[in-house]
Amino acid sequence: MLIFNFTQYGINDLKRIYKKAITENIKLYGPCKNFKKLLVEVKYSYGEGTSGRNVRGTAWITIRIPRSKPNKKHIVIIFDHELMHVRGYRHEDETLKKCLTFEQIKWIHNYKLRKRIGRPPGQKHKTKRKTKK
Ligand SMILES: [Zn+2]
């Protein structure tokens, strides 16, 4: 899985949540070839909600989360819905109509979603250089 993170939320926190959600989805529905080449784009939503997008059958998912106080449960439920599209399911399919219950995503309580602390303004990012000896 590759994550393109356009938010201030930590990429490692996001990765842990999505990886766990994938593991749980596989437990329920079996392995999926497309999951190996998953591209997850994380952006801010325009309002306070969380939303997702996937072109059915492709491995590219876009998730939009609010700038402040994102609901982790919603993030998991929506991501799982998109995973089902990656598997090829349509909204008309019975399998996609039933979304995850809160009971099935209790694990999320043990997962953090923290904002990165930005560098102070004006401070440049330092890149490491190899020094010859
Ligand atoms: Zn959908």
Image (cartoon, grey):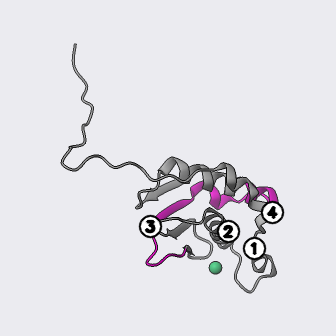
**Residues drawn in magenta:** 23-49
Residue 53 locus on image (x, y percent): 55, 75
Residue highlighted by disc 3: 67
Residue 51 locus on image (x, y percent): 55, 75
Residue at 73% of width from left, 53% of height from top?
107
Tell me the CA gap for discs 3 and 1: 25 Å
Q: Is residue 4 left or right of residue 31?
A: left
Q: First in sequence: mark 3 or mark 4?
A: 3
Residue highlighted by disc 1: 99
Q: First in sequence: mark 2 or mark 3?
A: 3
> Which amino acid type corresponds to the residue marked 3 in the rendered image?
Arg
Tell me the CA gap for discs 3 and 4: 26 Å
Front tag of 1 and 4: 4
Residue 71 locus on image (x, y percent): 59, 66
Q: Quadrant of residue 82?
A: bottom right
Q: Are marks 2 and 4 in contact (CB under 8 Å)?
A: no
Q: Which quarter of the frame holds ligand 1?
A: bottom right
> Which amino acid type corresponds to the residue marked 4 in the rendered image?
Glu
Tell me the CA gap for discs 2 and 3: 18 Å
Residue at 53% of width from left, 67% of height from top?
60
The CB of the residue at mark 4 lies under 8 Å from ligand 1: no
Q: Is residue 116 magenta?
A: no
Tell me the CA gap for discs 1 and 2: 7 Å
Q: Are marks 2 and 3 in contact (CB under 8 Å)?
A: no
Q: Are marks 1 and 2 in contact (CB under 8 Å)?
A: yes
Q: First in sequence: mark 2 or mark 4?
A: 2
- Looking at the rendered structure, the secondary structure element under dot 2 is helix
Residue 33 locus on image (x, y percent): 67, 58
